[in-house]
Image: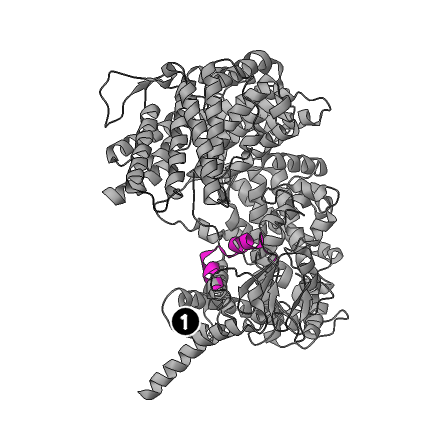
Amino acid sequence: MAFFLLLIAALVAIILLEPLATYFIDKKNFRRFPNQNLISGITNFGYILERIGGVRSRRLHRVHEKHSIVRVGPNSLSFSSPQAIRDIYGHATTCIKGDMYRLLVGDHFNVLNVVDKTEHARKRRYMANVFATRNLDTWEYKVADKIQRLVRHFDAVCAKSAAGNDRSDRVVDFRKWSNLFTIEAIADIAISRKLGCLETGNDTVVINTPEGHQKCIKYIDSLHSDRRATSGIIWANAWFPVWRHVLEYVPGFFRSNWRRGQDFDELVMFLAEERVQRYNNGEDLDDLVRSILQDKEGMARGLDIGEVKAELNVFLDAGSDTTAIALTHVMFYILRNPVSLQRLREELDTALVNIDIVAPHNLVKNLPYLRACLDESLRLSPPVAFGVNRKTPPDGAKIDNQWIPGGTTVGVPAYTAHRNPGLFPEPENFRPERWLEEGVKAAQNSFIPFSAGARGCIGRNLTYMEQTMLIASLIHRQNCRARRIKCDEKKPCGNCTRRSLSCNQTEFIVHNKLSVLDITDHEGAGKEMSGNTGQDIKASTSHNPESTYDVFQQAQSTSQHGSRASTKGSGSAEVTVTKEIVLRYALSSSLLLHAICALSAKQMSLIGDSFLWEPVSTRYYGLSLGLLIEELKKQQSSREIVIAATILLCSYELLACPGADYQKHLYGARSLFHTHNIASTGTKLEKASFWIYARQDVSMALVHECATLVLPQEWPTLSECEELEEDVLGNQILWILAKLIQFKFSDKGNSLHDWHADLQKLISEIDLWWERFPIPARGVATTEPPDNGLKKIWFCVPSAATACLYYHLAKILSLECLLERPAVTPPSPEYHTTWLEEIGYHAITIASISLSPGLPGGALVVTVNPLFYAAKHIDSIAVKANIWAFLEDIERRLGFHTQNRVSRLQRETIPNNG
């Protein structure tokens, strides 16, 4: 018994006390660097948890935004500067591959995990020549064959859909099919083997076992299973072998995944033995493995099967998985950015005039915008986002002007290096044009999706060839769009987890699914999009609207019925813009006419016949973008037209592609306001356009709890929009609300005294506005009895209702600020109770205004976010039930997405009160 107690004490000392002692003794002086998490200096366990949770790269990036060097483990440092990239990965570096690579070695090293530089140079010499761009062209026919087979499948999907007239039949899982494509491509390039995945539509490969039986192996599943389990604990470093040995005997996630992963090892061994046997039989096959088996003179190298298997493992793993990830990402970003899609299609249509199916590599490999799209996707979403590990030499090394002791694990995460705002302005935006601008050389030096230096990815030219040819072929031949799906949020679907995203849809339930495309024939809708934008567009079915004039009439009809969710606002500014655009400009401006038609058709697709109106809205949107681009190219473009059209197209995009990344739809308008200094020099129409934009900006900022894109201090003055006094006051309270949102959700770095002084100024502005607001415009309670405590209120003009909503919402936000940071801590119970009661009063008033009869569609849409925000302060389940019924009705009648809010309200209400 004493022996076991002594053993336990020794284990505790090793596991707990030794790391603590190392941390406090701090021989390497690493405590001078900030930690990634609370326990980074003591153990790697925090890093492991963040990896398993899928938040590692983003959390590390947030720390790197403040610190260039971060401690991510007891003996691990992460760097972010361009200098660190050169010091760690450059050709002159003294660093070697980290200990992690030794832990992954089987019986033989391969070109990826070999640590010794001399041995790596020997292995790299085998393959460096065949991976050169000039030699890859000899394998182009292998890639072209796989593209043709993939396109053949997509064509069959389109033909089947056309015959059955069922749009759902046109949906294909691009993530899956791109992975099947890369599997087939690398199998043919590496070992001259066709696996049949593109024909069967799945990843099943049949092998012969040593016992003489046949076995079906899931290529993707077995590969991912092993990597999924291993990547979770590999960061334990020296403890990895121990943890792996223990977890292999513990039923659960790790054991089941490792056992499935054994199938991939069997598959690789079978294919390696088969390829060596073909070589021994005298088959002279042009592939990668030939360069391993024999030298340039054709003399056999005499390698054993274990080394061949080790190298083939790298080819079949990295050559299929990372390229598939890159293909999925670039298609995702292109389809999410219609302007980029339009420009890319124009470039491809010019280069591939007589090409029908497969884009030849020599015609597309030097297309600047295509390459820019690929690089921009790799910048935003590198397949390997973390810092590829290196270890400093025993004598230490100078990294980023800091002397780092020997034996330290170091790295630069590509995710962070690619978001350096000094090198990549607006780093979160997909903007391929940045790679075509002057001065891009500095940015290219920090572009490390393939790592850098002598240990950089040897297959980068191959993946570029595959991506270039496939993306060019699909975009040129097919008209693709991201599928709109609904996530009920009732159970985890795994989509977010597979993409290392946190499942947190903070606003909309409808979003674009990364791995799904809607494929239709490029001849027709796609070609019309890039055709003569001055002509009427004839629809493809007999019951569709026949011309632009028909769609424009529908736009007017939709507006008259009060269901224009486009502007998301109401009042005289909206009326002014409607009159100015529709009556004076639209019929004389092709750009505005098409923008109005696009927006109206989009809303009709959401509230009416989607099959009828969706293609119409898509076509007009594409035409509008083309016209907008042409207008912007003019030396003397019409500012009013451009800004008004941009606002309309922003509204279209918010309806078509809602999601947590809503801000990208507003960047264009924001840039125009800043460029043309609308706040100071804008015309009446331009400023009226701004106030419509401002309603969208404030609404989105409220939901996402952040400042508006255009900060309140940059807004135009309020004296020139004077159609109605109510509207002037409505804009003013909107401006005050924007300031309060910025105040509440920004960094509270001020002293408590200064913070309260600023808050009191805002509260005084709110109260002064209310005092000046005309009493008749505050609404009149009807004589109808209250419905569950909600009075029905009648307003003389819709803008008065929206102004009152903004006022009561501002009061709620200001009171929340007082509760969060009271002037006296803790506040007296009387004040606390009074504040809560006052918040409840304003919340009920917002509900009463929103649910009152007679409000037009634009005003109803404005109520959605204030109502949703106020609902959390309402205790009555009956009132909340009225609220979510009202929100559901808005989506059904107006097409504005509200189901996510309804689901959240129901989840927050029923479990607590049911």
Residue depicted at 47% across the width and 67% down the height = 233
Query: In the rendered image, which quarter contains the N terminus?
Result: bottom left
Which residue is the extreme one toward the top?
583
Residue 21 vs 812, above or below: the answer is: below
| Residue 541 in sight from this viewpoint | no
Q: What stretch is highlighted in magenta?
A: 47-68
- Seen from the viewer's position, the closer of residues 766 and 631 is 766
- Seen from the viewer's position, the closer of residues 88 and 584 is 88
The amino acid type, in three-letter code, at marker 1 is: Leu
Q: What element carries label 1?
A: helix
Residue depicted at 37% across the width and 41% down the height = 819
- Asked which quadrant contains residue 135, the reply is bottom right
| Residue 384 in sight from this viewpoint | yes
Judge whether residue 64 is colored magenta: yes
- Asked which quadrant contains residue 27, the reply is bottom right
Crowding at dot 1, Cα within 10 Å, few <14 / some 14-19 / many 20+, comes out as: some
Q: Residue 54: x and y, percent?
A: 47, 55
* Residue that carries the numbered disc 1 in the rendered image: 247
